[in-house]
Image (cartoon, rainbow, N blue to C red):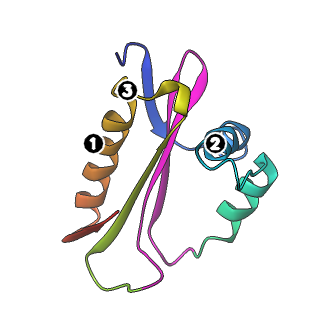
Amino acid sequence: MTAGLLLRPMEIPRDCEGVARVRSACFPAWPVSGDEVAGTEARRPRDRLHLAWVAVQQEEIAAYGYVEEPSIAARPGRIRIRVLVAPARRGRGIGGALYDTLLRRALEAGATELVT
């Protein structure tokens, strides 16, 4: 199922094209480019928690996810977790493995309430 799966923090700009492919496959009505992903990451407020991770399998980004403090309805301890898995890679435990990693990061950051 998750053989050969590597979970690691997202690297910019290295991972931006792969993340764009996953995002665009998950939301085909709203495709994005690697440059757009890089721009979005560069504009994130540095005073808010945002930890982006990728799941790499067979040298390809299979999933992308992040932990962040939401900007809307924010309050201490409220943390959002998002996970996107490429449609062709679903059903193999990749999303669950990435979610578990992000959940640990959220708890380490002091999460008392999770928003998905």
Q: Judging from the image, what secondary structure is the residue with disc 2 in?
A: helix
Q: Is residue 75 above or below residue 57?
A: below
| Quadrant where the C terminus is found in the figure | bottom left
Please state which amino acid type lies under the numbered disc 1.
Answer: Asp
Q: Nearer the viewer, mark 3 or mark 2?
A: 3
Please tell me whether residue 60 belongs to the stretch shown in magenta.
Answer: yes
Please state which amino acid type lies under the numbered disc 2.
Answer: Val
Number of the label disc, if any, that sits on residue 74: none
Please tell me whether residue 47 belongs to the stretch shown in magenta.
Answer: yes
Dominant SS type (magenta): strand
Magenta residues (range): 46-72
Which residue has dot 1 on it?
A: 100
Earlier sequence position, callout 3 versus callout 2: 2
Please state which amino acid type lies under the numbered disc 3.
Answer: Gly
The answer to whether mark 3 and mark 1 are in CB contact below 8 A is: no
Q: Is residue 96 left or right of residue 7?
A: left
* Image coordinates for residue 112, horizontal then vertical, percent: 18, 71
Q: Is residue 16 left or right of residue 95?
A: right
Which residue has dot 3 on it?
A: 91
What residue lies at 73% left-to-right and 55% top-to-bottom?
38
* Image coordinates for residue 91, horizontal then vertical, percent: 37, 26
* Depth check, front residue: 39 or 33: 33
Q: Marks 1 and 2, Cα distance to the nearest angstrom?
A: 19 Å
* Image coordinates for residue 108, horizontal then vertical, percent: 25, 58
Earlier sequence position, callout 1 versus callout 2: 2
Which residue has dot 2 on it?
A: 19
| Quadrant where the N terminus is found in the figure | top left
What residue lies at 37% left-to-right and 66% top-to-bottom?
80
